[in-house]
Image (cartoon, rainbow, N blue to C red):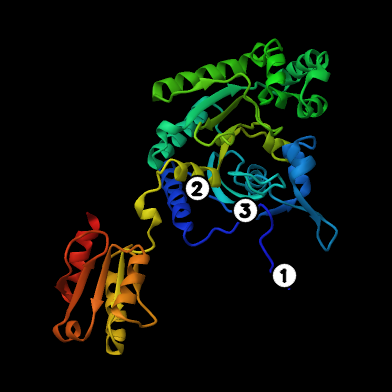
Amino acid sequence: MAKIQAIRGMNDILPEQTPIWQFVESTARRVLRQYGYQEIRMPIVEQTDLFKRSIGEVTDIVEKEMYTFDDRNGDSLTLRPEGTAGCVRAAEEHGLLFNQTRRLWYTGPMFRHERPQKGRYRQFHQIGVECFGIQGPDIDAELLILTARLWQELGLTDHARLEINSIGSSAARKEFRGALVEYLTQYKSELDEDSQRRLDTNPLRILDTKDPGTRKLLADAPRLEDYLDAESREHFGRLKELLDAAGIAYTVNPALVRGLDYYGKTVFEWVTESLGAQGTICAGGRYDGLVEQLGGKPTTAVGFAMGLERLILLLDTLGLVPEEANSNADVYVTAMGDAAIAPAMALAETLRNQLDGRVVISHCGGGSFKSQMKKADKSGARYAVILGDNEIENATAGLKPLRSDEEQSSVAQSDLAAVLAKALAN
């Protein structure tokens, strides 16, 4: 009988990998808390219409990538391909938006039926941040300052570059879209296959094509910035002033558009040159019309999402994973002989009580001194605590450093937690 394996593009995250995930997630959680953002948790399955109405029926996501199925009641349901629409639905459904400002964030799996490749999977994980009810560019700036702080905390400041653009109002985009289509139709046969298809469905996406031939044609195409409405120009100009004042470096990229229909005005991406073609690590922008589009009252909104797989790949590629993120333990308590098992377990419990937040593994399963030391070393712990007949008799414990050449010492059990606390702090 053939073994059942994971679905292609949906990967297991193994125990050796989860510490780096926990490091990134806890760092993001800490930064978001500093800025007053509150966590919201939404279901991973939503009504299909939610995504058709928000993302747009002629986008690649809705047309080709969603996991959609009929449930037993005949309702069309979809595994969420992104988080913003579900967050808006939840906030509106529970009355979180009317005459209020909200700073929200969430994390979890998203699903798209794409061709799996390095840094891009069919089940992938995102941290999303959404802010509702603030109209000015200061909240756009705050989100970018927040992400800059996160890169600093993760050690990525020198490896993440900010690109920004304004795509204006829906009326301005409609006028620009007409001019762009008129221009590109003259050269339709010279466009790459994807751009030919998008010319009839989502022509703005042609602007960020990677095809050299199409990019050459775009050099003389109409420019979106020439069609911007006055309000969008003012908003974008003020955003740039705020970023300059905050010391946040950026590049204005006129070709930057977002693949989802609900965006308007500010759009942005944080990109890296360290991951090849998969260079975007965080992207977002304003979507002031989405709440109303989904049945709520007009509400301004801005947000972003960052892919955790890609962030972790970047940290790993650059060798920026901190040592503690690769370690499963701080202290490993061993028991030499049956008589030492119960006292060793009790000592481990005492250390857990006194070493707040430290990981203390108690050896189980018996074995020789050599085999227990091998397991202690493999755990990643910095110290092994050794308890045998002699130590029990004298109320002491052996303390063996595992990550240095220091000699093993004997420590009174009453002093052990204090000695370990000091040693682990260094």
Foreground label between 2 and 3: 3
| Residue 320 spot, x, y in % from top left | 40, 43
Residue drawn at x 75%, y 37% as measured from the top left: 60
Q: Amino acid at mark 2?
A: Gln
Tag 3 near tag 1, CB within 8 Å? no
Inter-mark Cα distance, 3 to 1:
36 Å
Q: Which comes before the other along the chain, label 1 or label 2?
A: 1
**Residue 41 visible in the snapshot:** yes
The C terminus: image quadrant: bottom left
Q: Is residue 341 above or below residue 397?
A: below
Element carrying mark 1:
loop
Inter-mark Cα distance, 1 to 2:
46 Å
Q: Mark 1 highlights which residue?
A: 2
Residue 42 numbered tag: 3
| Residue 227 spot, x, y in % from top left | 68, 13
Element carrying mark 3:
loop
Circle 1: is it few (<14), some (14-19), or many (20+) Cα within 10 Å? few
Q: Is residue 371 above or below residue 70?
A: below
Q: Is residue 415 left or right of residue 173?
A: left
* Outermost front residue: 370
Q: Nearer the viewer, residue 410 or 81?
A: 410
Circle 3: is it few (<14), some (14-19), or many (20+) Cα within 10 Å? some
Residue 38 numbered tag: 2
Q: Which comes before the other along the chain, label 3 or label 1?
A: 1
**Residue 131 visible in the snapshot:** no
Q: Is residue 162 left or right of residue 11?
A: left
The N terminus: image quadrant: bottom right
